[in-house]
Image: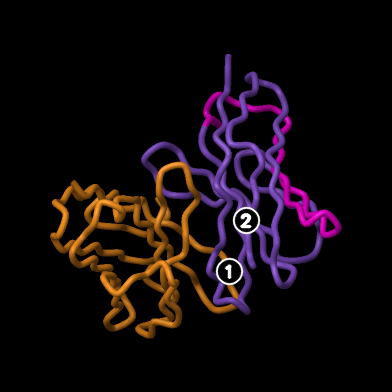
Amino acid sequence: DTGVSQDPRHKITKRGQNVTFRCDPISEHNRLYWYRQTLGQGPEFLTYFQNEAQLEKSRLLSDRFSAERPKGSFSTLEIQRTEQGDSAMYLCASGGTALSAEQFFGPGTRLTVL
Amino acid sequence: AQSVTQPDIHITVSEGASLELRCNYSYGATPYLFWYVQSPGQGLQLLLKYFSGDTLVQGIKGFEAEFKRSQSSFNLRKPSVHWSDAAEYFCAVGHPEYGNKLVFGAGTILRVKS
């Protein structure tokens, strides 16, 4: 257990529905990262926060995706109008500071879009 | 472009045999280097990391890795594999200059035969 939790662990939804995932990082960490992992691939970076500020978004993150980190604590990742191609494992990682590159990953949320 | 190559998709070794998993990277600067392990349905666990200094680094579970700048490589080794080491292994690179976001390889699936 890395101390990073994600909820839900599994989500099955129908195409066109909206879904929201939550990540609770290690409490003293000010950086939070989202990655997406599809079958047979390594995780791909989506976005990251330092405290409540979203500092970077990948081009993978279409306008149907939005992430927030209110008050610099937990984060949510929302996908609107889901598509079958959104089916993947969504991983959250917690990092300490700008100079501390080490990241601790949560167990992930597996999304299946039917 | 930043990329990580793990040339071996699958590797099978006998229990008790030695192991080497290959990792090559392409990056703008000398990156920070990581090896993560992922068991089925689980998140990623950090095995070891290299930031600077001694190019041979020790990690958890008896793993070690060697950074070779001239070859842009960071290969993972273990002298004697245990059946519990069967999992998928990911090499990753990052750097504070790029927000510490990690770029992952596609992974190597390790099978251990008894």
Tag 1 and tag 2, C-beta contact below 8 Å: yes
| Chain with colour purple in the figure | B
Q: Position of residue A57 (x, y in %)?
A: 42, 76
Residue at 15% across, 59% down = A16
Is B92 left, or right, of A41 in this rendering?
right
Is A91 left, or right, of A103 in this rendering?
left
The quadrant in which residue A68 appears is bottom left
Q: Which residues are magenta?
A: B65-86
Three-letter amino acid code at disc 1? Ala
* Residue A59 image label: none
Magenta includes A14? Answer: no
Q: Position of residue A86 (x, y in %)?
A: 30, 56
Q: Which residue is mark 2?
A: B34
Pointer 1 chain = A
Pointer 2 chain = B
**How many neighbours does mark 2 have within 10 angstroms: few (below 14), some (14-19), or many (20 or more)?**
many
Q: Which residue is mark 1?
A: A101
Badge 1 and badge 2 in a common chain: no
Q: Residue furthest top?
A: B114
